[in-house]
Amino acid sequence: MRVEDLSGDDATVYRAVAELEDDVAAPHLHDIARRTGLELERARSAVHRLLHTEPKILHEVPDTSPTDLGPVYELAPRS
């Protein structure tokens, strides 16, 4: 799947991750849901789909901050 082919929640989540990465660091799921206005479960479903595309569109990265908010998400490098 190509980024250009994304639509609906998947496209919205992809754009949110791109914007949030630029703002601070890689976002947590709740940051993505807040930015998109999606319910947490809808955001989680879109993140899950983006994590399992071929080629990879999104990467899950362990959060190294002292908070326990779960993993953060980054855009995969585009080739």
Image (tube, rainbow, N blue to C red):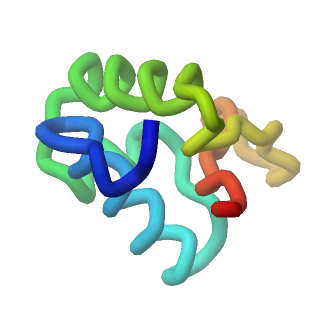
Q: Tell me the residue at 43%/46% (across/down).
A: 2
**Seen in the image, is 30 located left or right of residue 43?**
right
Pinpoint residue 68: horizontal percent, then vertical percent.
Answer: 70, 34
Q: Nearer the viewer, residue 29 or 48?
A: 48
Q: Nearer the viewer, residue 68 or 5?
A: 5
Pinpoint residue 77: horizontal percent, then vertical percent.
Answer: 71, 61
**Image: 38 above or below 2:** above
Q: Nearer the viewer, residue 42 or 10?
A: 10
**Seen in the image, is 29 located left or right of residue 32?**
right
**Image: 65 above or below 40:** below
Pinpoint residue 41: horizontal percent, then vertical percent.
Answer: 27, 17
Pinpoint residue 1: horizontal percent, then vertical percent.
Answer: 45, 35
In the rendered view of the protein, which quadrant contains the C terminus? Answer: bottom right
Among the 4 quarters of the image, the one containing residue 17: bottom left
Q: Tell me the residue at 20%/52% (across/down).
A: 36
Q: Tell me the residue at 22%/23% (across/down).
A: 42
**Image: 40 above or below 7:** above
Q: Tell me the residue at 40%/52% (across/down).
A: 3
Q: How many marks?
A: 0
**Seen in the image, is 43 located left or right of residue 36?**
right
**Seen in the image, is 24 located left or right of residue 37?**
right
Q: Nearer the viewer, residue 6 or 31?
A: 6
In the current view of this chain or complex, which residue is farthest to the bottom? 23
Among the 4 quarters of the image, the one containing residue 43: top left
